[in-house]
């Protein structure tokens, strides 16, 4: 029968192997640090870009709200100028002839104050465009009213003249 050798003592010995050496000149890519830095930089760039987009959208919303407020105030002023107690359409006869300069001065004064109350140049530029659009409407209406009143006045004066000349 075969015999199995027996070991009474452990013959296992520890040996110190070669120690790992890290070169101080090792590139960051050796540890995937360069790639991580690039990914972090891209993520940071996307984050900053997203924040900038959000800020721009919020500014546009705020500008729109402010311009709506501006337009509402302008509309109220236009209505007052046209239909108020001393408005364009309350002038009759020869009183309607010279209203143009007075209305234009009042319009320019008020709209300049309104535009100056805005906070930035972009809002001011958009407001100026709106002021011009509304002024064109006011001016056109004022010209039509003045023309109609002039025609009525001329007709009335001619009829009065003819009536008076017949009575003489």
Image (tube, rainbow, N blue to C red):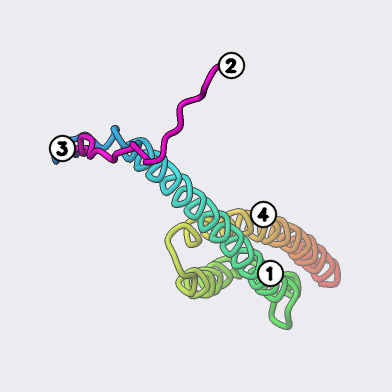
Please name the residue shown 52% across and 22% down the image. 3
Mark 1 lies on residue: 72
Instruction: Give, as a single range, the part of the protein colored magenta.
Output: 1-21
**Is 77 situated left or right of 60 in this image?**
right
The furthest residue to the front: 1
- Tell me whether circle 2 and circle 1 mark residues in contact (CB < 8 Å): no
Mark 3 lies on residue: 23
Q: Which mark is residue 140?
A: 4
Q: Nearer the viewer, mark 1 or mark 4?
A: 1
Dividing the image into 4 quarters, which one contains the C terminus?
Answer: bottom right
Q: Secondary structure at mark 4?
A: helix
**Percent coordinates x, y for residue 102 in the rendering:** 55, 73
Q: Main secondary structure of the magenta part?
A: loop
Dividing the image into 4 quarters, which one contains the N terminus?
Answer: top right
Please name the residue shown 19% across and 39% down the image. 22
- Viewer-nearest residue: 7 or 142: 7
Calculate the distance from the C-alpha at mark 2 to the C-alpha at mark 1: 114 Å
Q: Which mark is residue 1?
A: 2
**Is 57 situated left or right of 155 in this image?**
left
């Amino acid at each position: 029968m075969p015999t199995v050798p027996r070991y009474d003592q452990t013959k296992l010995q520890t040996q110190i192997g070669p120690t790992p050496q890290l070169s101080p000149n090792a590139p960051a890519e050796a540890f995937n640090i360069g790639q991580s830095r690039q990914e972090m930089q891209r993520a940071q760039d996307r984050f900053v870009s997203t924040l900038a987009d959000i800020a721009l959208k919020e500014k546009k919303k705020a500008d729109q709200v402010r311009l709506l407020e501006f337009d509402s105030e302008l509309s109220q002023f236009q209505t007052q100028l046209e239909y108020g107690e001393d408005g364009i359409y309350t002038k009759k006869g020869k009183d309607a002839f010279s209203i143009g300069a007075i209305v234009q001065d009042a319009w320019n004064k008020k709209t300049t104050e309104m535009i100056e109350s805005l906070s930035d140049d972009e809002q001011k530029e958009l407001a100026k465009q709106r002021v011009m659009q509304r002024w064109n409407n006011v001016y056109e209406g004022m010209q039509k009213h003045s023309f109609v009143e002039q025609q009525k006045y001329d007709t009335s004066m001619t009829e009065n003249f003819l009536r008076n000349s017949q009575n003489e």
